[in-house]
Image (cartoon, rainbow, N blue to C red):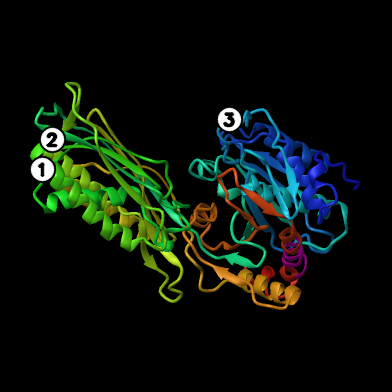
Amino acid sequence: MKYVHKYEATKGLEPEPFFYWFGEVSACPRPSGNEKALIEYIKAFAETRSLEYDVDEAGNVFVKVPGTAGYEDYPPFLIQAHMDMVAVKDEGVDFDFDTKPINLQIDGDKLYAPGTTLGADNGVGIAAMLALGDTLTEEPIPHPPLELLFTVDEESGMKGIKRFDCSKITARRMLNCDGGAPHRVTVCCGGSIQSKIEKEFEIFAVEEDWTVLNVSLTGGQGGHSAVMLNRGRACAANNMGELLTALMADDIEFRISSLKTSKPAIIKGCDAVIAVPAVSAETAVLSMNERFALIKGVYKNSDPDLELSISEAGCTAECTAISAADSEKVVQCLLYLETAMYRSHYEFTQFQVSGGSIGEVSLTHGKFNADFVVLSSINEDLRLKFKKYELKMKMLGFDLTEYDSWSGWAEDTVSPLRDALLEAHKELFGYEMIIGRGIGGIEVGEIKTAIPEMDAVAFAPFSQDAHTTGECLSVSQVQPFWDLLKKLIIINFLRNNINANTI
């Protein structure tokens, strides 16, 4: 086919099939919850090629590509990616994700969208699937039947895949295109339990002989809570809890007036307004500064710009705060809902198996809210960890309420598909493919929960800074991905070690 590119930025880039279809995907508005334009595009794609397809009530699209002559009865191969993208733009940028195509630009090896997210997460997977489906329906390249699953609403909590009827899938081998990289295969992913605390405390006027202090922690590095917990970075909400325990240790009475954190994931900053007896104000400031010196020492390498500022705010008749007893409970909550890696891999200790992250926290006019997520690639571990924190919060008088969850994907000891991929990579590039393990959430967990015997791997073109306006795709890393993808499906899958007799 002769490709007519919609974007100047994709012209001349190789492999052309991938970048043509990445442009087509980028031209379809698709923020989470509004993927209608891309759904209709994929339907038209299937119809013009006489491919069988199905669209469910959620909007997930399931397309079947028949095997070439002689391979029609081979076991099918599933490829899966999600259609939606995170819609983030820089302050002052005028861009409507619901109606406008992404503004693709090229700068050397970097494909990006100035001022907005690029949508490589997971546009690269959708583009690869369309490019593959188009290539294999037009060229007589031997391949098994393919099942292409395009899901919706992944970024807002795996909502699409959780509504998909996995009994439609006949494949027992799959590639997810939302994890890994051309030279790194992902072999497990994290499940998640999302929870929250909502509690309303009685508030009281701050006495005139008390001093109100603004306490601010800033300068944390932050980061993705699912993939950077093993970096040892500071969580400002946890640090604020540590800071205020200095007052408890020194028997200084204090009351919290307000509390507010920066947006998750790993929280970069936290502000608190507290009240202390005026006679204790100087001691309170000294205690917090001494405690911060310890905190600063812990994070001197991971978060060298971490700073504390304490200033006197004065007190007005309108100033209110929760009680001292309730303030101590809030501080303990900030301490116990820890952002950290909880357990590493039993053999490869550099990889995390489970962890947790406190999310956005606020206390305003006595209304306290806190989000908390537990992550693990092992579902039993996930549930046990949540039960532990649920009990800790109950002891403080808080209800930690689960409001969403999705399944993890535990690493399979035996995986013929993983072995075939490693072999294909070694033949193509002459060196071993890296095996990646982590607790970032991808949709394989939900599929394997429905089909436990599914043999899965995940790899994709290399992109970075997902969910931010710095998101970009490395052009040079797409060709290795494309070559490996075709070799895995067209060559290795058809070898005797992965055929109908091994299913």
Q: Is residue 427 left or right of residue 244?
A: right
Taking depth in this image into account, of 448 and 402 the one nearest to the observer is 402
Q: Main secondary structure of the magenta part?
A: helix
Q: Is residue 420 left or right of residue 254?
A: right
Tell me the quarter of the image containing the C terminus: bottom right
* Image location of residue 374, percent across then percent down: 37, 53
- Amino acid type, mark 1: Ser
Residue extent of the magenta highlight: 482-491
Local crowd size for mark 2, using a 10 Å CA cut-off: few (<14), some (14–19), many (≥20): many
Residue 393 is at least partly visible in this image: no
User: How far apart in space, not on screen, are marks 3 and 1 (Cα)?
Assistant: 44 Å
- Amino acid type, mark 3: Gly
Q: Is residue 82 left or right of residue 268?
A: right
- Are the residues flagged by discs 3 and 2 in contact, CB closer than 8 Å? no
Please name the residue shown 87% across and 52% down the image. 138
Q: Earlier in the sequence, mark 3 or mark 2?
A: 3
488 magenta-colored: yes
Answer with the quarter of the image where residue 47 lies: top right
Please name the residue shown 82% across and 43% down the image. 49
Residue 422 is at least partly visible in this image: yes
* Image location of residue 18, percent across then percent down: 77, 52
User: How far apart in space, not on screen, are marks 3 and 2 (Cα)?
Assistant: 41 Å
Please name the residue shown 44% across and 51% down the image. 222
Answer with the quarter of the image where residue 326 lies: top left
* Image location of residue 189, percent across then percent down: 50, 59
Residue 280: mark in rendering: 1
Local crowd size for mark 3, using a 10 Å CA cut-off: few (<14), some (14–19), many (≥20): few
- Tell me the residue that label 3 is attached to: 92
